[in-house]
Image (cartoon, helix red, strand yellow):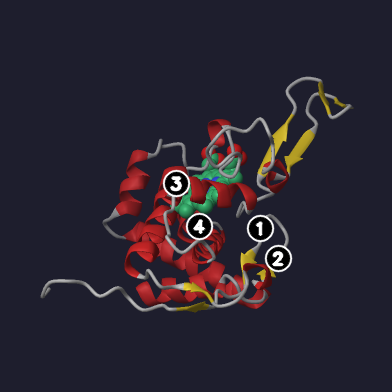
């Protein structure tokens, strides 16, 4: 069902009808996965019995598309940063990935929290049980923030389940670009890259990433 999965992933960025079709596609893929031997079954078996099949199905269909909304858009910004970079391409990959995630968090409005007690925040007193929605992009320039992706993956018990996976995937893409496509550069000034802001909980993504010099490096040896 790989073609179905690819088709559903592509439609995630279409109009409302496309997104609805994509969601239907992910739901079917998850249902099929649960009927066969494999990772989905294994997940079902490992989860506590009080987690219903319906909940496992929801979890699976979400896992199938979540990277489209997060790692996918982040990849555009990460590659754009490298492609716009200096000639020597001496990149600290981890720091670059983290900095991009801090400045352009793919899920900037996902951090819902409720105050457990009275809290004063920027001169405003919030009573207990007040909903607080943190704007992650607004935390990018926090002078007290140490190294790392900041709050891009959330914090606490609900920290993103894929924090290591997503950073490793983005870093791997940078390594491949730098190593195998040494002449690749942005074909337009970085400031001219057009962003799309779908709204809701989603962050920005690039409309296109025009590149020149995308020739693979010639490898020595016969293989
Ligand atoms: C650059 C990529 C990604 C970013 C920036 C990101 C960001 C986030 C954020 C901000 C949250 C909410 C955390 C909180 O409330 O404290 C979250 C939750 C979550 N993310 Fe990600 N995410 C990314 C990729 C992914 C991918 C690829 C997957 C799955 C393969 C994934 C799975 C999850 C899950 C399961 C949760 C819920 C965790 C829970 O509630 O316990 N994420 N993510």
User: Is residue 76 in view from this perspective?
Assistant: yes
As helix, strand or loop, the secondary structure at mark 1 comes to: loop
- The numbered mark at residue 197 is 2
Residue 59 image position (x, y, % from top left): 49, 51
Residue matched to label 3: 94
Residue matched to label 1: 203
Q: Nearer the viewer, mark 3 or mark 2?
A: 3
Determine whether label 3 and label 1 are within 8 Å by CB: no
Q: Residue, x 69% and y 36% (percent of image)?
A: 142
| Structural distance between the alpha carbons of marks 2 and 4 | 16 Å
| Structural distance between the alpha carbons of marks 1 and 2 | 6 Å
Residue matched to label 4: 71
**Which quadrant of the figure has residue 80?**
bottom right
Q: Nearer the viewer, mark 3 or mark 1?
A: 3
| Structural distance between the alpha carbons of marks 3 and 2 | 26 Å
| Structural distance between the alpha carbons of marks 3 and 1 | 21 Å
**Which quadrant of the figure has residue 193?**
bottom right
Determine whether label 4 and label 1 are within 8 Å by CB: no
Q: Residue, x 67% and y 50% (percent of image)?
A: 108
- The numbered mark at residue 91 is none
| Structural distance between the alpha carbons of marks 4 and 1 | 11 Å
């Amino acid at each position: 069902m790989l073609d179905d999965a690819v088709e559903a992933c592509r439609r995630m960025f279409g109009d409302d009808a496309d997104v609805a079709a994509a969601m239907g596609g992910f739901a079917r893929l998850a249902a099929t996965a649960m009927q066969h031997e494999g990772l989905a079954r294994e997940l079902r078996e490992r989860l506590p019995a009080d987690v219903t099949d319906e909940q496992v199905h929801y979890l699976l269909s979400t896992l199938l598309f979540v990277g489209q909304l997060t790692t996918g858009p982040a990849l555009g910004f990460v590659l754009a940063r490298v492609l716009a970079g200096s000639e020597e391409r001496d990149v600290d990959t981890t720091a670059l990935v983290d900095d991009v995630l801090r400045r352009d968090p793919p899920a900037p409005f996902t951090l819902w929290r409720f105050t457990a007690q009275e809290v004063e925040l920027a001169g405003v007193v919030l009573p207990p049980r007040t909903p607080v929605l943190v704007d992650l992009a607004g935390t990018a320039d926090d002078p007290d923030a140490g190294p790392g992706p900041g709050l891009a993956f959330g914090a606490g018990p609900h920290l993103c389940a894929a924090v290591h996976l997503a950073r490793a995937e983005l870093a791997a893409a940078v390594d491949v670009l730098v190593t195998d496509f040494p002449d690749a550069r942005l074909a337009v000034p970085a400031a001219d890259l057009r962003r799309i802001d779908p709204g809701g909980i989603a962050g920005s993504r690039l409309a296109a990433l025009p590149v020149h010099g995308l020739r693979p490096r010639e490898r020595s040896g016969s293989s």
